[in-house]
Image (spheres, helix red, strand yellow):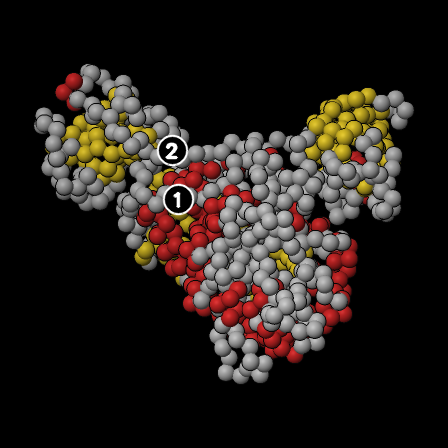
Amino acid sequence: MQQPINVALTGTATASSVESALPGNTAAMAIDGNTATRWSSSYVDATWLQVELAAAGPIDHVKITWPNAAARAYTLQTSLDGVTWTDIKAMTSATGPGRVDEVQLGVSNAKFIRMLGSKRWSTFGYSISEFEIYDRAQPVVPDNLALVPLPAASAKTEAGTFQLTPSSRIVVSGEALAAANYFAEKARKSTGFKLPVTTGHATAADVAFTVAPESSEDKPESYTLQADANGIKVAANTSAGALNGVQTLRQMFPQWIESDIVINTPWTVDGVIISDYPRYEHRGIQIDVARSFYTVDEMKEHIDNAAQFKFNMLHLHLTDDQGWRIAMDQPLVNPAGIKYTDLTDISGKTAMTYNDAGVLQGTELGHTGFYTKDDYKEIVRYAGENGMTVVPEIDMPGHTTAALHAIPELNSAGSGPKPLAGTDTAPAQGSGNVGGSTFDADNAATYEFTKEVLTQLAAMTPGPYLHIGGDESHITPHDKYNQMITAFAGQVLDLNKKVIGWNEYSSAELPAGAVVQYWAGNRQNVANRVLANDSKVILSPAEKTYIPQKQDSSQTAGGTWACGGPCTLQNHYDWNPGTYLPGVGDDRVLGVETVQWGEWMRGMDQTETYQYPRALATAEVAWSPQANRRYADFSKRVGTLGGRMALEGLTHFKTAGINWATAPAAPEATPALADTSALPEVSPIDLAIPATEFTGGAYLTLKNLPANEWLLVAVDRVGKDRGNANRFEWVRSNELGTAPLNVANGVTPGDYTVTVQGATGSLLGFATVAKSSPANGKAGN
């Protein structure tokens, strides 16, 4: 099957204008195959960019990537001679910069194609990083498995369907016990099955977890998963890989697996084989607890949310201008006489309040509080159980008002802001202003303080990284900034940790192994410093990963500066970390991180609404092979997660255009049960229960039912008045119209009538089963 060819790569691009401030952003940059470069125009609505192809031919579709400035309205035109133009398609969009337009044209023959702008997104011009032109349609491929993130390789099989039953076990081998227990604890809540974790030979009813050398691809965190009528087998080289397999397995089961109450539904997994591993080793999610605090329980919810999508790094932004959130002990050696407990005694009580105009920031005042050392250790422990490593951040030398407000010794000639008259510390800051604070590079107490804080933090942090911030130190003289960053980074190195900092800090002299976290700024300049320092980079470009940016114009809070409008789900999905910084390929990309800031968000529900589903896009960008990713496919898969997230209580924004699955609860009211003495001669539907005797505890399957509905199943002793022997329960049918029937223990032998009713009480079907001797736990069909 022939793949479409981007014929623009061999063409010649011209434009009606180039932005005067950026004369290097020529038309040729739009067809160079590099999304890190771009053409940008003058600030005029009526502007065009055109491509002359190497030879005339068909144009099936185009793909236009708008990085920094975009069109609200434009027309795509074609021509054979570059003189006479034909309008092919007029385009309008309600989504700003950062979007990708894929436009079907179906032109049989053309030599030229033009984007003719008619309305800019804002006051800036137009900006196109890639104008891709394809000669034929993308081959139609089968839908991927409904998994997020998308596995590296997967295939459906014809080897039958696995069914979890009350007799199923979780069989463990090697160092897979943690993963096995993780899955068993999750599945017991929703299935009601015992699911004992054991060793030995796995049967066709069991789920087996194995950790052993050469069990999966020779890649970090890899795993394999095979499900069919012979059982489920998850195998990995490492325990981390086995846990990744668990997260995938959760999505293979019906969405009801995420329920915290028992749901009676068929627990099946279709035949599949998966071989999977991550693209990047760092798949991070940052939360700003400094501007508005989150409790330990909220953090556990945050970890639960992220870990299931294979995020493995939890970046805690612990300090900023508005608050200090981590307790520090008084050291035995304290030359400057600093009272470290004041950091939380004073600045643990401050948070976001009002802007300079007196307007409340967010729906309420920022939440105050702090983590004791035991709190922090509990977050670290819980994160570790869920496969996540904590990366703590102490932001400095800027974003330091909270420290300056609490500690008089840090307030000196070179620090800022200055204390008010009659005070010895900087005033508290409740606004979201940035860049107005700094430590003093010439104050010995600065380095004594940072060394002590980093030392205590390192002792509580088993992970390899400490983050020192380094962003937006606008009032810090550049030489003083570099002096402090070099010193702080050296302190981290002395603690046998690796240092991370925002991309501004790459201007300083950094130790070997230092990691640069890019968020904004000149990409080429940052790339040059990354390459010169032989650093690795974490990519968190604001227009692709920043959560406080609105994702839809309907949201009342949040910024729009990163994208010149809403930063949409597609915007967060459609980019390639391996080409984002010029010359910085996958070998230097440590990973990708989604970033939440707390100027407007209060509490976990609000945070989740801004974070999801966009965090799912980042999860897939960080995990899945670039060549496998397509937004149209992702949008289908992410929609299937709606019911799961609802069952988990994970609040998420309902992105327009996504077909979101739901998880309706069982009806609260139970209709009158069918009168078994007045049943018709023939059941309206054949429930397909085999005509044989079953023991108590048997697990039968009812068939031919309405699909995906709540049904009321009752079991009555034939010839007896309805009483205690009667059993009824709500069951949930699956997409095949099957549902489970438990022949309960504790009922006497004899014939029983099974009736199935709809939610309104209508009779759907009935059958007779014979209950024989006491249960032996065997499963039926």
- Please rate how many residues cluster around mark 2, counting C-alpha atoms within 10 Å: few if below 14, some from 14 to 19, many from 20: few
* Residue projecting furthest to the top: 681
Q: Amino acid at mark 2?
A: Pro
Q: Give SS at disc 2.
A: loop
Residue at horizontal 65 percent and vertical 79 percent from the top: 444
**Where residue 125 sits in the image (x, y, percent)?**
79, 38
Eyeballing the image, is 216 above or below 634?
A: below
Sequence-wise first label, 1 or 2: 1
The residue nearer to you, when weighing 666 against 534, is 666
Is 216 on the left or on the right of 98, as rendered?
Answer: left
The residue nearer to you, when weighing 606 against 105, is 606
**Where residue 2 sits in the image (x, y, percent)?**
69, 33
Eyeballing the image, is 310 above or below 736?
A: below
Q: Amino acid at mark 1?
A: Glu
Q: Is residue 195 visible?
A: yes
Q: Which residue corresponds to mark 1? A: 258
Residue at horizontal 19 percent and vertical 39 percent from the top: 744
**Where residue 123 sits in the image (x, y, percent)?**
77, 38
Quadrant assignment for the C terminus: top left
**Where residue 586 sits in the image (x, y, percent)?**
67, 55
Is 120 on the left or on the right of 655, as rendered?
Answer: right
Quadrant assignment for the N terminus: top right
Q: Give SS at disc 1.
A: helix
The residue nearer to you, when weighing 133 against 431, is 431
Residue at horizontal 47 percent and vertical 42 percent from the top: 651
Q: Quadrant of residue 81?
A: top right
Residue at horizontal 59 percent and vertical 81 percent from the top: 336
The residue nearer to you, when weighing 399 against 140, is 399
Q: Which residue corresponds to mark 2? A: 664
Q: CA distance from mark 1 to mark 2?
A: 13 Å
Q: Are marks 1 and 2 in contact (CB under 8 Å)?
A: no
